[in-house]
Image (cartoon, helix red, strand yellow):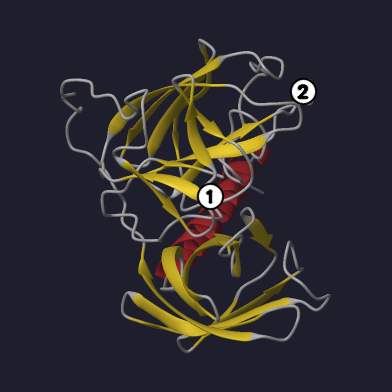
Amino acid sequence: MLPSAFTHRARTTVVCASLLGLSHALAAQERPPIIGRWDLTVQTKDGPRPSWLEVTSSGFGTLVGRFVYAFGSARPIGQVTFADGAFSFAIPPQWEQGKELFRVEGRITADSLRGSFVLPDGESQSFAGARAPLLRRDRPPVWGTPRALFNGRDLSGWRAAEGENKWRVINGILTNTGSGANLITDARFTDFRLQVEFRYPKNGNSGIYLRGRHEVQVEDTGDREPESTYLGGVYGFLVPNQRAGRAPGEWQTYDITLIGRRVTVVLNGKTVIADQTIPGITGGALDSDEGAPGPRCAAR
Protein backbone atom coordinates (compact mmCIF):
# COMPACT_ATOMS: atom_id res chain seq x y z
CA MET A 1 0.00 0.00 0.00
CA LEU A 2 1.30 3.47 -0.88
CA PRO A 3 2.02 5.92 1.94
CA SER A 4 -0.92 8.26 2.63
CA ALA A 5 1.10 11.38 1.78
CA PHE A 6 1.98 9.99 -1.64
CA THR A 7 -1.63 9.01 -2.27
CA HIS A 8 -2.76 12.57 -1.43
CA ARG A 9 -0.21 14.05 -3.85
CA ALA A 10 -1.33 11.72 -6.61
CA ARG A 11 -4.96 12.67 -6.16
CA THR A 12 -4.02 16.36 -6.15
CA THR A 13 -2.18 15.88 -9.44
CA VAL A 14 -5.23 14.23 -11.00
CA VAL A 15 -7.51 17.06 -9.81
CA CYS A 16 -5.12 19.71 -11.16
CA ALA A 17 -4.93 17.89 -14.48
CA SER A 18 -8.74 17.80 -14.67
CA LEU A 19 -9.01 21.54 -13.96
CA LEU A 20 -6.33 22.24 -16.56
CA GLY A 21 -8.28 20.24 -19.12
CA LEU A 22 -11.42 22.22 -18.28
CA SER A 23 -9.64 25.57 -18.70
CA HIS A 24 -8.30 24.46 -22.11
CA ALA A 25 -11.81 23.46 -23.15
CA LEU A 26 -13.22 26.84 -22.10
CA ALA A 27 -10.42 28.72 -23.85
CA ALA A 28 -11.22 26.80 -27.03
CA GLN A 29 -14.82 28.00 -27.05
CA GLU A 30 -15.46 30.68 -29.64
CA ARG A 31 -16.12 34.16 -28.28
CA PRO A 32 -19.55 35.24 -29.56
CA PRO A 33 -19.02 38.20 -31.92
CA ILE A 34 -21.98 40.05 -30.40
CA ILE A 35 -19.88 40.69 -27.25
CA GLY A 36 -18.78 44.31 -27.03
CA ARG A 37 -20.18 47.82 -27.21
CA TRP A 38 -22.26 49.05 -30.12
CA ASP A 39 -23.21 52.57 -31.22
CA LEU A 40 -26.69 52.43 -32.77
CA THR A 41 -28.97 54.77 -34.70
CA VAL A 42 -32.72 54.11 -34.58
CA GLN A 43 -35.23 55.42 -37.10
CA THR A 44 -38.17 56.96 -35.23
CA LYS A 45 -41.24 58.84 -36.47
CA ASP A 46 -39.44 62.03 -35.41
CA GLY A 47 -36.28 61.18 -37.32
CA PRO A 48 -33.04 59.33 -36.47
CA ARG A 49 -32.11 59.03 -32.79
CA PRO A 50 -29.00 57.59 -31.09
CA SER A 51 -29.03 54.38 -29.07
CA TRP A 52 -26.39 52.09 -27.52
CA LEU A 53 -25.89 48.43 -26.62
CA GLU A 54 -23.31 46.53 -24.57
CA VAL A 55 -23.15 42.71 -24.43
CA THR A 56 -20.89 40.84 -22.00
CA SER A 57 -20.51 37.22 -20.91
CA SER A 58 -21.59 35.90 -17.53
CA GLY A 59 -20.28 32.51 -16.46
CA PHE A 60 -19.80 29.72 -18.98
CA GLY A 61 -22.43 30.55 -21.58
CA THR A 62 -24.85 33.30 -20.56
CA LEU A 63 -24.82 36.67 -22.30
CA VAL A 64 -26.03 39.76 -20.43
CA GLY A 65 -25.78 43.47 -21.13
CA ARG A 66 -26.90 47.08 -20.91
CA PHE A 67 -29.03 49.16 -23.25
CA VAL A 68 -29.64 52.88 -23.79
CA TYR A 69 -32.56 54.06 -25.89
CA ALA A 70 -32.98 57.58 -27.31
CA PHE A 71 -33.87 58.86 -23.85
CA GLY A 72 -33.61 57.64 -20.27
CA SER A 73 -30.69 55.92 -18.57
CA ALA A 74 -28.74 52.71 -19.15
CA ARG A 75 -30.85 49.71 -18.19
CA PRO A 76 -29.73 46.13 -17.51
CA ILE A 77 -30.40 43.20 -19.83
CA GLY A 78 -30.90 39.95 -17.92
CA GLN A 79 -30.13 37.69 -20.89
CA VAL A 80 -29.21 38.09 -24.55
CA THR A 81 -30.01 35.17 -26.86
CA PHE A 82 -27.49 34.68 -29.66
CA ALA A 83 -27.24 31.95 -32.32
CA ASP A 84 -26.11 31.84 -35.96
CA GLY A 85 -25.57 35.59 -36.11
CA ALA A 86 -29.00 36.49 -34.75
CA PHE A 87 -29.60 38.05 -31.32
CA SER A 88 -32.59 39.13 -29.26
CA PHE A 89 -33.54 40.31 -25.79
CA ALA A 90 -36.48 41.86 -23.96
CA ILE A 91 -36.49 44.37 -21.10
CA PRO A 92 -39.17 46.13 -19.04
CA PRO A 93 -40.32 49.60 -20.14
CA GLN A 94 -38.59 52.61 -18.62
CA TRP A 95 -39.97 55.98 -19.79
CA GLU A 96 -41.73 54.63 -22.88
CA GLN A 97 -45.51 54.59 -23.21
CA GLY A 98 -47.18 51.20 -22.89
CA LYS A 99 -46.87 48.25 -20.53
CA GLU A 100 -45.45 45.49 -22.74
CA LEU A 101 -41.80 44.51 -22.82
CA PHE A 102 -39.33 46.47 -24.96
CA ARG A 103 -38.17 43.85 -27.51
CA VAL A 104 -35.02 43.94 -29.61
CA GLU A 105 -34.08 41.61 -32.48
CA GLY A 106 -31.19 41.86 -34.90
CA ARG A 107 -28.34 40.28 -36.78
CA ILE A 108 -24.60 40.86 -36.76
CA THR A 109 -22.53 41.01 -39.94
CA ALA A 110 -18.81 41.57 -39.38
CA ASP A 111 -18.71 44.72 -37.22
CA SER A 112 -22.21 46.00 -37.93
CA LEU A 113 -25.67 45.35 -36.51
CA ARG A 114 -29.13 45.69 -38.04
CA GLY A 115 -32.50 44.93 -36.58
CA SER A 116 -35.69 46.26 -35.04
CA PHE A 117 -37.11 47.53 -31.77
CA VAL A 118 -40.70 46.86 -30.75
CA LEU A 119 -41.60 49.45 -28.13
CA PRO A 120 -43.92 48.75 -25.17
CA ASP A 121 -46.81 50.46 -27.03
CA GLY A 122 -46.31 48.19 -30.06
CA GLU A 123 -44.53 50.69 -32.33
CA SER A 124 -41.78 49.11 -34.46
CA GLN A 125 -38.53 50.92 -35.29
CA SER A 126 -35.52 49.82 -37.32
CA PHE A 127 -31.93 50.36 -36.21
CA ALA A 128 -28.41 49.98 -37.52
CA GLY A 129 -25.08 50.33 -35.78
CA ALA A 130 -21.37 49.67 -35.62
CA ARG A 131 -18.91 48.54 -32.98
CA ALA A 132 -18.09 51.44 -30.66
CA PRO A 133 -14.54 52.83 -30.85
CA LEU A 134 -12.15 52.23 -27.94
CA LEU A 135 -11.02 55.89 -27.85
CA ARG A 136 -7.66 54.98 -26.33
CA ARG A 137 -5.00 57.67 -26.27
CA ASP A 138 -1.33 56.74 -26.74
CA ARG A 139 0.04 59.88 -25.05
CA PRO A 140 -1.08 62.46 -22.49
CA PRO A 141 -2.87 65.51 -23.91
CA VAL A 142 -1.11 68.81 -24.44
CA TRP A 143 -3.68 71.48 -23.60
CA GLY A 144 -3.94 74.61 -25.68
CA THR A 145 -4.76 78.15 -24.62
CA PRO A 146 -8.03 78.33 -22.62
CA ARG A 147 -10.98 79.81 -24.49
CA ALA A 148 -14.22 81.30 -23.22
CA LEU A 149 -17.38 79.65 -24.52
CA PHE A 150 -19.68 82.43 -23.28
CA ASN A 151 -18.92 86.13 -23.86
CA GLY A 152 -21.25 87.46 -21.15
CA ARG A 153 -23.28 89.52 -23.64
CA ASP A 154 -25.21 87.29 -26.05
CA LEU A 155 -25.49 83.77 -27.49
CA SER A 156 -22.70 84.17 -30.05
CA GLY A 157 -21.05 80.79 -30.59
CA TRP A 158 -24.16 78.88 -29.48
CA ARG A 159 -27.28 77.56 -31.18
CA ALA A 160 -30.56 76.15 -29.91
CA ALA A 161 -31.76 72.74 -31.06
CA GLU A 162 -35.18 71.04 -31.11
CA GLY A 163 -37.66 73.25 -29.35
CA GLU A 164 -38.30 76.84 -28.39
CA ASN A 165 -35.16 78.67 -27.32
CA LYS A 166 -35.72 80.03 -23.82
CA TRP A 167 -32.08 80.78 -23.06
CA ARG A 168 -31.37 84.45 -22.37
CA VAL A 169 -28.44 86.56 -21.19
CA ILE A 170 -29.65 88.38 -18.07
CA ASN A 171 -27.24 90.68 -16.22
CA GLY A 172 -24.29 88.90 -17.83
CA ILE A 173 -25.54 85.42 -16.84
CA LEU A 174 -26.56 82.74 -19.35
CA THR A 175 -30.03 81.91 -18.05
CA ASN A 176 -32.61 79.27 -18.95
CA THR A 177 -35.98 80.94 -18.41
CA GLY A 178 -38.04 77.77 -18.92
CA SER A 179 -38.08 74.26 -20.32
CA GLY A 180 -37.27 74.33 -24.02
CA ALA A 181 -34.44 73.76 -26.46
CA ASN A 182 -30.99 72.46 -25.64
CA LEU A 183 -28.15 74.94 -26.15
CA ILE A 184 -25.19 73.70 -28.19
CA THR A 185 -21.80 75.21 -28.99
CA ASP A 186 -20.95 75.85 -32.64
CA ALA A 187 -17.39 74.66 -31.93
CA ARG A 188 -16.66 70.94 -31.65
CA PHE A 189 -14.09 69.26 -29.43
CA THR A 190 -12.27 65.97 -28.89
CA ASP A 191 -10.43 65.94 -25.53
CA PHE A 192 -10.79 68.91 -23.21
CA ARG A 193 -11.00 70.42 -19.74
CA LEU A 194 -14.23 72.27 -19.09
CA GLN A 195 -14.77 74.75 -16.25
CA VAL A 196 -18.36 75.78 -15.52
CA GLU A 197 -20.08 77.91 -12.91
CA PHE A 198 -23.78 77.19 -12.46
CA ARG A 199 -26.70 77.48 -10.10
CA TYR A 200 -30.21 76.07 -10.15
CA PRO A 201 -33.53 76.79 -8.41
CA LYS A 202 -35.16 74.40 -5.96
CA ASN A 203 -35.97 71.11 -7.74
CA GLY A 204 -34.04 72.30 -10.81
CA ASN A 205 -32.97 69.65 -13.31
CA SER A 206 -30.55 70.10 -16.22
CA GLY A 207 -27.23 68.70 -17.44
CA ILE A 208 -24.03 69.22 -19.41
CA TYR A 209 -23.42 66.92 -22.39
CA LEU A 210 -19.75 66.22 -23.12
CA ARG A 211 -19.21 66.12 -26.89
CA GLY A 212 -23.01 66.20 -26.98
CA ARG A 213 -23.09 62.50 -25.99
CA HIS A 214 -22.33 61.97 -22.28
CA GLU A 215 -24.46 63.83 -19.74
CA VAL A 216 -23.01 65.04 -16.46
CA GLN A 217 -26.04 65.66 -14.31
CA VAL A 218 -27.03 69.07 -12.94
CA GLU A 219 -29.90 68.64 -10.49
CA ASP A 220 -31.12 69.67 -7.07
CA THR A 221 -30.77 66.29 -5.32
CA GLY A 222 -30.55 67.65 -1.77
CA ASP A 223 -28.96 65.32 0.78
CA ARG A 224 -29.89 62.07 -0.99
CA GLU A 225 -27.19 59.42 -1.34
CA PRO A 226 -25.27 59.71 -4.63
CA GLU A 227 -26.56 57.96 -7.73
CA SER A 228 -25.51 58.13 -11.36
CA THR A 229 -28.65 60.13 -12.18
CA TYR A 230 -27.99 62.73 -9.44
CA LEU A 231 -25.75 65.80 -9.30
CA GLY A 232 -22.14 64.89 -10.15
CA GLY A 233 -22.98 61.62 -11.91
CA VAL A 234 -22.55 60.59 -15.54
CA TYR A 235 -26.18 59.79 -16.24
CA GLY A 236 -26.97 56.10 -15.84
CA PHE A 237 -23.30 55.02 -15.76
CA LEU A 238 -20.97 56.58 -13.17
CA VAL A 239 -21.87 57.27 -9.52
CA PRO A 240 -20.23 60.16 -7.62
CA ASN A 241 -18.17 58.95 -4.65
CA GLN A 242 -19.59 61.60 -2.30
CA ARG A 243 -22.15 64.38 -1.94
CA ALA A 244 -20.58 67.70 -2.89
CA GLY A 245 -23.55 69.79 -3.98
CA ARG A 246 -24.72 73.07 -2.51
CA ALA A 247 -28.17 74.48 -1.80
CA PRO A 248 -30.43 75.76 -4.59
CA GLY A 249 -29.59 79.34 -5.56
CA GLU A 250 -25.91 79.02 -4.60
CA TRP A 251 -23.17 79.18 -7.20
CA GLN A 252 -21.38 75.87 -7.84
CA THR A 253 -18.49 74.76 -10.06
CA TYR A 254 -17.65 71.85 -12.32
CA ASP A 255 -14.13 71.11 -13.53
CA ILE A 256 -14.50 68.23 -16.00
CA THR A 257 -11.68 66.54 -17.91
CA LEU A 258 -12.49 64.16 -20.78
CA ILE A 259 -9.71 62.19 -22.47
CA GLY A 260 -11.01 59.56 -24.86
CA ARG A 261 -13.56 57.75 -22.66
CA ARG A 262 -11.82 58.64 -19.39
CA VAL A 263 -13.55 61.32 -17.37
CA THR A 264 -12.73 63.14 -14.14
CA VAL A 265 -15.43 65.27 -12.52
CA VAL A 266 -14.58 67.80 -9.81
CA LEU A 267 -17.67 69.30 -8.17
CA ASN A 268 -17.14 72.32 -5.93
CA GLY A 269 -13.46 71.41 -5.49
CA LYS A 270 -14.10 67.74 -4.64
CA THR A 271 -13.18 64.96 -7.06
CA VAL A 272 -16.39 62.91 -7.23
CA ILE A 273 -15.44 60.83 -10.30
CA ALA A 274 -11.74 60.08 -10.76
CA ASP A 275 -10.45 58.99 -14.19
CA GLN A 276 -13.31 56.57 -14.87
CA THR A 277 -14.38 55.11 -18.23
CA ILE A 278 -17.67 56.25 -19.75
CA PRO A 279 -18.99 53.07 -21.44
CA GLY A 280 -21.21 54.77 -24.02
CA ILE A 281 -23.69 57.50 -24.85
CA THR A 282 -26.32 58.57 -22.35
CA GLY A 283 -30.00 59.13 -23.07
CA GLY A 284 -30.70 62.38 -24.89
CA ALA A 285 -27.38 62.39 -26.76
CA LEU A 286 -27.19 64.31 -30.03
CA ASP A 287 -25.80 61.30 -31.90
CA SER A 288 -23.98 58.00 -31.34
CA ASP A 289 -20.87 58.71 -33.44
CA GLU A 290 -18.53 58.42 -30.44
CA GLY A 291 -15.35 58.61 -32.47
CA ALA A 292 -16.11 62.08 -33.83
CA PRO A 293 -15.53 65.45 -32.16
CA GLY A 294 -18.64 66.90 -30.57
CA PRO A 295 -20.02 70.13 -29.12
CA ARG A 296 -20.51 71.18 -25.52
CA CYS A 297 -24.21 70.99 -24.83
CA ALA A 298 -26.27 72.46 -21.99
CA ALA A 299 -29.51 70.57 -21.47
CA ARG A 300 -32.83 72.38 -21.38
**Could you tell me residue 105's position as x and y percent?**
57, 84
Q: Residue pushed farthest right?
A: 99
Q: How far across and how far down the image is residue 154, in percent?
A: 36, 32
| Residue hosting label 1 | 13
Specify which label sits upstream in the sequence, 1 or 2: 1
Would you say 118 lies left or right of 128 here?
right
Label 2 crowd bin: few (<14), some (14–19), many (20+), radius 10 Å: some
Residue at the spot of label 2: 222
11 is higher (above) or lower (below) than 244: below
Residue that protrudes farthest toward the top in the picture = 269
**223 lies left or right of 43:** right
Secondary structure beneath label 2: loop
Q: Is residue 179 above or below residue 30?
A: above
| Disc ID at residue 272 | none
Residue sitting nearer the eye, 72 or 238: 72
Where on the picture, by quarter, is residue 291?
Answer: bottom left
Task: Indicate left or right for 157 with 263 as reference.
Answer: left
What residue do we see at 22% from left, 39% from top?
Answer: 137
Q: Nearer the viewer, residue 11 or 231?
A: 231
Instruction: Characterize the local packing of mark 1: few (<14), some (14-19) or many (20 or more) Cα atoms within 10 angstroms.
Output: few
Task: Please provide percent x and percent y for residue 297.
Answer: 43, 43
Which amino acid, by three-letter code, is at mark 1?
A: Thr
**Snapshot quadrant of residue 156:** top left
Q: SS class of the residue under badge 1?
A: helix
Q: What distance separates the C-alpha of mark 1 from that of mark 2?
A: 60 Å
